[in-house]
Structure formats: C-alpha cells, structure tokens
Image (spheres, rainbow, N blue to C red):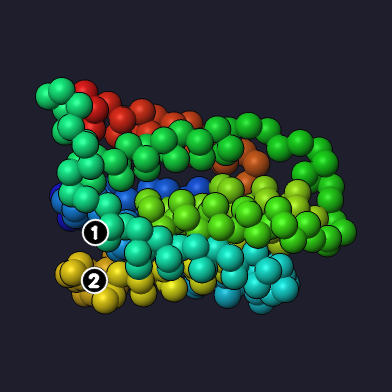
Amino acid sequence: MELIGFSASVIMGLSLGLIGGGGSILTVPILVYLFGVDPVASTAYSLFVVGLTSLVGSVSHFKKGNVDLKTAFIFGLPAIISVYSVRKFLVPAIPDIIMTIGSVTVTKSLFVMVLFATLMLLASISMIRKPKKKEEEQSDTHYNYLIILAEGLLVGGITGLVGAGGGFLIIPALVLMAGLPMKKAVGTSLLIIAMKSLIGFTGDLSGALIIDYKFMLIFSAFAIVGIFAGSYLTKFIPNEKLKPVFGYFVLIMGFYILGKELLF
C-alpha cells in the first residue's frame, strides 16, 4: 500500500505542476486512505507537503517571470494570518465528538473529511467549467484591497481546516481581482500557497500532535519529483485540456469520500 501511496504522491505533484491549482486537493485523501493517517493529523501533514512542493514549483515560475511578488504579499498576508490562527486556535478547540444526532455521532475526523469532500466538489466545478474570455484577456494589474483581504482570509481559513492549498480559489481571484494574466496567476498562486501552508503548519508545532518528519519529507520528495515532471510537461500539454479531465477525477473522488464517510 505504501508503494501505491508514494506513487499517488508523485501524481499529486504532477497535477500541481501541470495545472497549478487543484492538485494539492489529493494530498489528504492519499494520506488518509493509502497511509492510514488520522484525518486531523493528515491536514497538518498536508500543509507541510503542499507548502514545500508549491515552494519548489514557484521557483521555476519565478525564473520565468511568472511570479508577481507584490500581489503575492497583498493576497498572502491575510491568508497567512487566517491559516495560522485556524491551526493554532480553532482546530485544537474542536472537540473529538462534536454532536450526536440519534444514533449518528459526528466526530472531529468525520467533520474534517466531509468538509474536505465538499471542498473537492467545489474545486472540481471550478476546474471543469470553461474560463470566461475576460478571465483570459486581462493584463492590467489593479487591486480591490477589501475584496482581496476577504478572499485571503477565506482561503486561509479553508486551508487551515482541511489542509488544501486552495489554488482553485486563488487563481481566479488573482485573475479577476488583481488583473494578472493566467500564467502569472498560476506562478503567484504557488508562492502564496507555499507561504500560507508552511506558516500555517507551524501553528501545529506547539500542540499535542505527534509529527513524523521522516515520513513527511519522503512523501514531499516524491511530490516534488512529480511537480518537476509536471512543470516540464507543460511545454507539451496544454493546461486547458488537462484541467477539466482532472476536475472530473476530483469530482468522483469527492463523491467517493462522502459515500465512504457517511454511508459505509
């Protein structure tokens, strides 16, 4: 099962390198279902893996001039504050048993996985739908600071709760709210994901969570191999053709997780 899990981590990195946003959403299901990591702990592991992998991916984009540092800071700062606060204060405060409805007990792990599956469904819709022409053609950088602040806090909060990078939310926001071209939005998104995920991960360090650093580094190494391969393949495979296919895969995975957690 470990061999399948590490192979899946390469695929996760590959998808992140190919499509920029949405690839990291596979990390938690891989950790939970292929490695048997506790759902809550897997969100912390995911922050580290996604953060490190995205950081490596952002370097190649930076060399190509596809990272807007000012936009990354403006959008990333509220996201960093939000994700750190959620990991440091909110996640530890959620009780192991949230509520009991009849014979159904809603545990912290069940809550995390259902929330994560719901996020996967939303991400899949974002990836499947065709981009509007105005999203592709914008090139003038401008900032709606209030909306960017709200979006950053929202994305940071989601990242903190479920450990996903949120690229499927960040990239459209950077295109529509900051006027970045798509390629620069993808590169800038990777840097934002890296910053908020790695800093968010530090919110777990002082808690009771026992972290297997050796496993995280090995998992990250496989994912990094994938992101290098994905970044290379972007020269030959158009992003717009791959994204809907991956979106349908994420859609199926989201329904699978909901069925597994709620019905079986």
Classed neighbour count for the residue bearing mark 2: other residues with Cα under 10 Å, few (<14), some (14–19), many (≥20): few
Please determine whether, in this image, residue 255 is positioned above or below residue 93.
Answer: above
Residue 101 in sight here:
yes
Disc 2 on helix, strand or loop? loop
Residue at image point 66% right, 76% down: 63
Please determine whether, in this image, residue 63 is positioned above or below residue 57.
Answer: below
Residue 188 in sight here:
no
Q: How many marks are shown on the rendered structure?
A: 2
Disc 1 on helix, strand or loop? helix
Residue 23 appears left or right of 241: left
User: What amino acid is found at the position of numbered circle 1 in the picture?
Assistant: Ala
Q: Nearer the viewer, residue 242 or 100?
A: 100
Q: Nearer the viewer, residue 44 or 15?
A: 44
> Marks 2 and 1, how far apart in space?
11 Å
Residue at image point 18% right, 69% down: 208
Residue at image point 63% right, 47% down: 239
Quarter-of-image position of residue 264: top left
Residue 164 appears left or right of 173: left
Residue 28 appears left or right of 37: right
User: What amino acid is found at the position of numbered circle 2 in the picture?
Assistant: Gly
Label 1 near label 2: C-beta < 8 Å?
Answer: no
Q: Earlier in the sequence, mark 2 or mark 1?
A: 1
Percent coordinates x, y for residue 194 in the rendering: 50, 68
Q: Find disc 2 in the rendering and name its residue.
A: 207
Residue at image point 74% right, 61% down: 145
Please determine whether, in this image, residue 153 is positioned above or below residue 111.
Answer: below
Residue 213 appears left or right of 25: left
Residue 41, label in figure:
1
Percent coordinates x, y for residue 82 in the rendering: 49, 63
